Image (cartoon, rainbow, N blue to C red):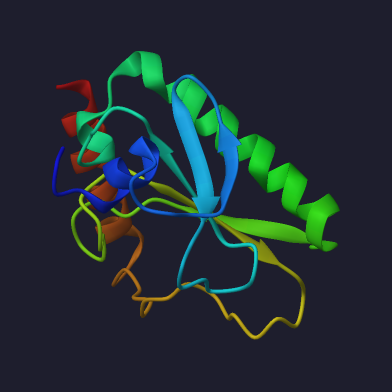
Amino acid sequence: MADCLFCSIIAGSTPAHLVLDTPEVVGFLDARPVFKGHTLLVPREHIATMVEMPDELTVPLFGAARSVAAAVRTAYSAQGSFVAVNNVVSQSVPHLHVHVVPRTKGDGLRGFFWPRTKYADDAEAAEYATKLRQALEG
């Protein structure tokens, strides 16, 4: 897509610090990292969100995420990683991308980036679970 930043990086028109280059997936450092080494993994094909992702891309994209999550431990002496995908909300570039953020205990990142809530009771939680199961079953 002509006006997509990530497509421009994939095409080589916009510079980026590449860390992974496969036939299906490209990985590069986030220009505004949560922590140094924060990597974005994107499919070469322009796909807006995970919802539109074809099944055949699941293994290459999330296999790359698994590989990068393992590699950040070695590369940066990280104890682990935070792996995330935004879909529309908080997705600053409308091209599917997986964040892999190196993590170390005491790094200052606490919990998730959004406020937490609670279910009123077990019945409400069960109701939410039932609704989602029904939606998944179609």
Where 15 sits versus 102, above or below?
A: above
User: Which residue shows up at 43% across the image and 54% down it?
Assistant: 15
The residue sitting at 67% across, 62% down in the picture is 102
Can you give x and y, in whole percent of width and height, for residue 84 in the image? 46, 54
Q: Nearer the viewer, residue 100 or 3?
A: 3
Identify the residue at image location x=81%, y=54%: 75
Q: Residue at x 37, y 46 (%)?
A: 9
- Specify whether 66 is left or right of 79: left
Seen from this angle, which residue lies furthest top? 56
Image quarter of the C terminus: top left
Q: Quadrant of the N terminus?
A: top left
Up/down of 57 relative to 118, above or below: above
Find residue 26 and report its horizontal and vertical position in percent. Answer: 48, 36
Q: In x, y percent, where is residue 96?
A: 30, 43
**Measured along the vertical axis of the image, is residue 104 above or below residue 58?**
below
Residue 95, percent across and down?
A: 26, 45
Direction from residue 74 to residue 86 in the image, left or right: left
Of residue 104 and residue 46, the one placed in the foreground of this image is 46
Q: Is residue 33 left or right of residue 88?
A: right
In this figure, what is the number of numbered marks? Answer: 0
Is 3 above or below relative to 133? below
Task: Say which of 136 and 88 sits in front.
Answer: 88
Q: Is residue 73 left or right of residue 30?
A: right
The quadrant holding residue 38 is bottom right
